[in-house]
Amino acid sequence: MSGSKLNVIIEALNVKFEARIHFSSGHRGDCCATLTSAAGGADNPGGTRKRLPKLKIPAKIWSHRKQNQDGGQNQHGGQNQTRTANRAGTTHCNDQPDGGHEEEEEEQQEEERLDDLSRKLILREEELFTRDGHSEEEEDQLLKDFESLSVRLWMAVHSSFDAPAGHPDVLRSAVDAVLEQETQDRRWTERPADSAPVWRPLRWLRTHNQLLQKIVEKRLKDAGEDETGDTGQLSSVTKRQVCRLGKRVKEDLLMAAVALRDCHPSRLDILNLYGGFYHQAFAARLAQLSSSELDLDDCSYLLFWVNHYYPDEILKHKELDGIKTACLGSLLLTDTLRRLEEQYMSHRQEKVKLWLSTALKKEQESWLSGKTPELIDCYYFSELAIDVIQVVNSSLTEFSCAIKDQNKAQRLTIHLENFLSSYRKSVEDLVKANPSNLHPVLKATLVCEQQLRDYICGQAKGLAEDQKRRCLDTLSALRDCCYQCFTFPLHGKIKVFLSPLWTSTWMDGSLPVIDQLLSFLKQHLADLSDLKPASKQPLVCDLHQDLAAQYLKKTMKTRVKSRQQQVAGSERMVEDAKKMDGFFREEGCSSAPWLSEIFFGVAEILRLQDPAIVHLEVVDLARRFPDFSDAHVSALLSLKFGLSAADVRSIRASVEENRPLDASANQSHPFFSRVKVKWINNKINQMAIKS
């Protein structure tokens, strides 16, 4: 047994036996005080009897006691002298080099289970203290035998982590002996106090738990001071010490769960006992480390262990199922944890803000220098979005492991929100300046916008719903700014190309209005070949919707003079819708077939002549597209030749009655809001006057 182990055992024994010096008085009190002194390893120069815990092992004592009882049981007057002589002879024999018989007894003692020895001592105790009278010498001998047993017990307990898998029976036997003595303590409390031995209650279970606690504290102390482990890759002394402490806690708790739990009865709940001791010792060591000012890296690493790795990876390990984690609490006091978390959050906020502002400033400098963005796979590209996503994602990932309250992530994500607002404003200012590299920069910006949108919608953690909505609204404004720069010059051209709609040359097919318009758009969209397809598709789809909106607006402002014109115009609308759908599909927009459905529905309303069927078609169109407002209904019905004012009023009323109650539940795309028909009020008033 090493000196450090012995010191721990002796210290635990001192705690248990020092109370004996307070026994009432007389020779017995002197004896117990002498035992306490001997247990500490001190000499007793003034006494005649020196009682060390290992003077005699219980097997020898039991054997000699039987011999003494057989030889002089009926001679009470000479019994003490005989026992004293026997003991003196035994002591002398132990000092001789040739002690074959004693060696056999020692081997027998070592093989005898500790719980068997404990039961024998209990039987001797019962026999000694239930008879009418006994000698002080017998009582002292029994006390020394208990002392000898206790040393072996605590040695077995102290060796728990050395090789429990190899000697589980020794530890199991020691624990059983402790519990047997605890039961004997309770028996004596039920008897008259003056009849109990002076050493009762032994309270070995309490001593057992105190020893475990000291073992745990010693193992963590050794782990913290051990520099020979595999923590050399960590950058600071504090990190290495925290890591060594945490690894020792994990390894020892797993040892307790796998190898030690079966050596203890379930009522001892040994896993939670060890869990509590390791939690307290680990917390004490971390409290010492956190009492001084920590730099950001050390603070972050300590918070990682306190808030993530210890509670989530160690205590929730599958082998440690059964540990009452709720009873353990945090490794750090609330005030200390709050101080460290605030230190971490303040530094991290400043870092994120600085990184994002630096990334945007670098991008702006590139714009203003006239530099053209990089081409990758024939598409313009900017690294800004990748840099921003890496900064935000790494910060949120580290935050999730360092901070317990995940709602505090908004203190970091607010800087992403502010960055996007600054990014949008910078692009708007760039568009106003209209530099020579504007279009390449906007193409690269659209790629960044798509990457940021994908990240916020899918991967970003820690964003509250309202923050996510504001970020997406800002990105939509940024995207619209870029799109308008590409599509605004087209609006006037599209209006000119659509001006012949509903003329006789358009209706008879001699003037290919849509063919000419699509040919013009094809030439213009060719300039977007270096825009990444994922960013080009929304632009093309937006252009498709804009074209369809201008087409229907032109249609609703037309004055149709006959039923024949309505039928011919409706047929031409269907052909034009098919041509537009095919063209934009080829350009990469295949997500808007519903635009053709709108054209087909409007064309069908124009073709039909029966007011009742027209009524049904208008109601159906309004149900499928909730933003088909009353003004749009009136504008469309104004095209119909032969509808009475009463028919119009009836259809309008029916549309309002049959609209879905919850328009937000309708999955249709908003479109008619693009078709401005404020002028229709004049037509409605004119129809009311005529009626």
Image (cartoon, rainbow, N blue to C red):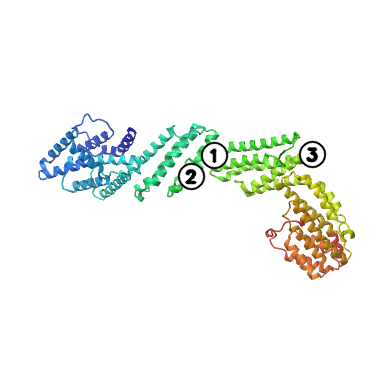
Whether tag 1 and tag 2 are in contact, CB under 8 A, the answer is no
Q: Nearer the viewer, mark 3 or mark 1?
A: 3
Question: Disc 2 on helix, strand or loop?
Answer: helix
Rounded to the nearest angstrom, the CA distance separating label 3 from label 1 is 46 Å
Q: What is the x, y in percent for residue 229? A: 44, 34
**Horizontal side of residue 664 vs 568, given as left or right:** left
Q: Quadrant of residue 682?
A: bottom right
Q: What is the x, y in percent for residue 114? A: 27, 44
In which quadrant of the rendered image does the C terminus lie?
A: bottom right
Dot 2 alpha-carbon crowd within 10 angstroms: few under 14, some 14 to 19, many 20 or more: few
Q: Amino acid at mark 3?
A: Asn
Q: Amino acid at mark 2?
A: Glu
Q: What is the x, y in percent for residue 233? A: 50, 33
Give the residue at mark 1: 341
**Horizontal side of residue 540 vs 249, given as left or right:** right
Question: Disc 1 on helix, strand or loop?
Answer: helix
**Horizontal side of residue 267 vs 247, given as left or right:** left
Q: Residue at x 77, y 66 (%)?
A: 617
Q: What is the x, y in percent for residue 283? A: 45, 39
Give the residue at mark 3: 434
Earlier along the polypeptide chain: callout 2 or callout 3?
2
Give the residue at mark 2: 313
Using the image as rendered, state which of residue 631 and residue 130 is in the foreground.
631
Dot 1 alpha-carbon crowd within 10 angstroms: few under 14, some 14 to 19, many 20 or more: many
Residue 528 appears in view: yes
Rounded to the nearest angstrom, the CA distance separating label 1 from label 2 is 20 Å
Q: Residue at x 26, y 33 (%)?
A: 37
Whether tag 3 and tag 1 are in contact, CB under 8 A, the answer is no
**Horizontal side of residue 256 vs 352, given as left or right:** left
